[in-house]
Amino acid sequence: MAKRRNPRVEERVKQAVAELLEEEIADPRVAHVTITDVRVSEDARHATVYYTTLDPGILTADPARTGGDVLTPQADVAEGLASAAPRVQGLLARRVRLRNTPTLRFEPDRVAAEARRIDELLHRVGDDQGAPGNGDG
């Protein structure tokens, strides 16, 4: 028998976690985190929260050029989310009424990272196609 998921619960948890990270967690390591997906176990005791961070091409590591915003290294983002997980879980229990409040585990969204990598490769191929001397003329 296939495991059943509850997309409504997952969406509610996703929205609540995203709001809680933005509104209640002051840790600068999680400032540029976007929650992309949540998978709640069948018994709702565990939830894997998938996240992505701001694309390094959008925000430079030079605080003078970004008005003070600095990219947080991936390892520090993961530490910040792991550190915030118990507090977010406690706040989640009050915000989203569930039989069980799931234990949160944050994981980087590999799909988003892979999509970004494919996009970069496509841009490179496009740039190579339009470069002079490659047989287009």
Image (spheres, rainbow, N blue to C red):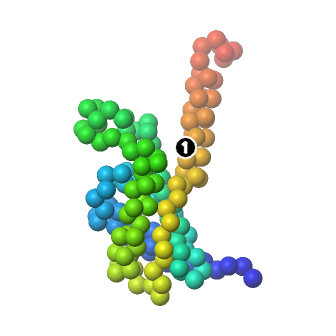
Q: Which residue lies at the image location 40% right of the left edge and 39% below the top edge?
A: 58
Residue 7 visible in the shown view: no
Residue 51 to residue 100: above or below: above
Residue 118 to residue 92: above or below: above
Expressed as whole percent of the image width and height from the top left, the position of residue 127 reads: 57, 25
How many marks on residues? 1
In the picture, the quarter occupied by the C terminus is top right
Q: Please state if 4 lies on the left or on the right of 91 as rendered.
A: right
SS for callout 1: helix
The residue nearer to you, when weighing 62 against 75, is: 75
Q: Please state if 65 lies on the left or on the right of 89 as rendered.
A: left
* Residue type indicated by callout 1: Arg
What is the residue that sits farthest to the right in this orientation?
A: 1
What is the residue that sits farthest to the bottom in this orientation?
A: 99
Expressed as whole percent of the image width and height from the top left, the position of residue 80 reads: 39, 56
Classify residue 41 by image quadrant.
Answer: bottom right
Residue 36 to residue 44: above or below: above
In the picture, the quarter occupied by the N terminus is bottom right
**Which residue in the protein does label 1 denote?**
116
Density class for disc 1 (Cα within 10 Å; few <14, some 14-19, many ≥20) is few
Expressed as whole percent of the image width and height from the top left, the position of residue 121 reads: 61, 34
Q: Which residue lies at the image location 59% right of the left edge and 46% below the top edge?
A: 114
Q: Please state if 115 lies on the left or on the right of 52 as rendered.
A: right
Expressed as whole percent of the image width and height from the top left, the position of residue 87 reads: 35, 70
Classify residue 95 by image quadrant.
Answer: bottom left
Residue 95 to residue 53: above or below: below
Q: Please state if 69 lies on the left or on the right of 117 as rendered.
A: left
Q: Which residue lies at the image location 36% right of the left edge and 35% below the top edge?
A: 61
Residue 77 visible in the shown view: yes
Q: Which residue lies at the image location 59% right of the left edge and 29% below the top edge?
A: 124
